[in-house]
Image (tube, grey):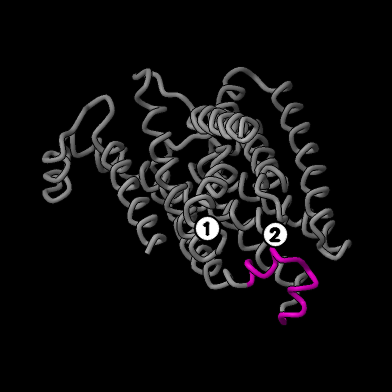
Amino acid sequence: MKKYNVFFTLLAILGFSIFLALSLGTMTFSWSEILHLILHRTEGSIPGTILWQLRIPRIVLAVVTGAGLAASGCVFQALLRNPLADSYTLGISGGAALGATIGIVSGLANIHALFLPLCAFCGTIVCIYAVYQLAANNRFSNHSLILSGVILGFICASMVLLLIALTNAEKLYSTLVWLTGDLSSTDPATIIIPFIMTTLGLGVLVLFSRELDVLTLGEEKAAHLGIDPEMMRKILFIIASLITAACVSVAGVVGFVGLMVPHLMRRFSGNGHRSLLIASAIGGAAFLTLCDTFARTVIAPIELPVGVITGLVGGITFFVLLLRKSSS
């Protein structure tokens, strides 16, 4: 019963965050106005255009990205048996950053709205493949995964800094905006891919929740319970990585969602991964939606990168937890 209360509370918070995102901005809407605009869509009107073409696609992207990053972070933490693991640890975000930077600096991102996410996705896939191959040579152990991810992350970060140093001011600004997280994309074609990947991927991960529980007990116990630890790690790593790749390719490098949300949800939903994955997905969706709403309204009309807000909130949260733990 307690877990159901957690889910209902998280869904209520998600609903509230969506309402705030719909209502707040350069033009403020009341609940009745939002309901009217949704039920009676007025083509060509300024309020209708703002709601349907700007805010709703942005909210969908925030919900999908937050859910995907939090769920995949939960899987990475289980695979590495480390509550502080996420896509940064495994170099996945670094590959996306390098791919996007190459797309911006080379001019490919200016050809079509889909080219920037495509470049970021390709960079992520290359990095995932490299981490997979390096780790597979060492039986896909926790140490090999972490070491491979950290090494490739440093290489990608160095390449990004090199490209930034060689580019002009206009492309430099576009690169920095993407690297700090950007949810302003309203092209349905760029949103549909992470939506499908996150939805399907999360469903598969929930189906493998028992295997995740067993893997956290160690390789020997997993083998005794009839699970091939190496093969299961490969499957779960690929699924979580593809979810991350799809989300990061569109939203940019949004930090701390995959790290902080599963860490906090574990305190409320417990360590069972079926409930933890669902709670992390809902919590991540609500968290990123709230952060994005704050980022675009706190000093309007200037819009802050959402990654700045998630980084500040995440850093302060972990700092508070560290202080409370040290004082206890």
Residue 318 in the image: above or below residue 264 = above
The residue that disc 1 covers is 270
Q: Nearer the viewer, residue 254 or 15?
A: 15
Element carrying mark 2: helix
Residue 289 showing in the rendered view: yes
Q: Quadrant of the C terminus?
A: top right
Q: Residue at x 58, y 48 (%)?
A: 118
Q: What residue type is labelled 1?
A: Gly
Say few, some or many: other residues with alpha carbon within 10 Å of mark 2 (under 14 / 14 to 19 / 20 or more): many
Residue that lies at the very extreme toward the front in this rendered image: 328
Q: Comparing marks 1 and 2, which lies closer to the viewer?
A: 1
Residue 195 in the image: above or below residue 177 = below
Q: Nearer the viewer, residue 197 or 77?
A: 77
Residues in magenta? 211-226
Q: Position of residue 272 (x, y in %)?
A: 55, 64
Element carrying mark 1: loop
Q: Is residue 187 magenta?
A: no
Residue 178 showing in the rendered view: no
Horizontal side of residue 187 vs 209, given as left or right: left
Quadrant of the rendered image containing residue 58? top left
Q: Distance between the residues labelled 1 and 2?
A: 17 Å
Q: Is residue 220 magenta?
A: yes
* Tag 1 and tag 2, C-beta contact below 8 Å: no
Residue 160 in the image: above or below residue 126 = above
Q: Which of 135 and 61 is in front in this view?
A: 135
Q: Residue at x 68, y 61 (%)?
A: 237
| Count of numbered circles in the view | 2
Examine the residues drawn in magenta and state their main secondary structure: helix
Q: Where is residue 159 in the image (x, y as percent from the top left)?
A: 77, 33
Q: What residue type is labelled 2?
A: Leu
The residue that disc 2 covers is 79
Q: Nearer the viewer, residue 253 or 270?
A: 270
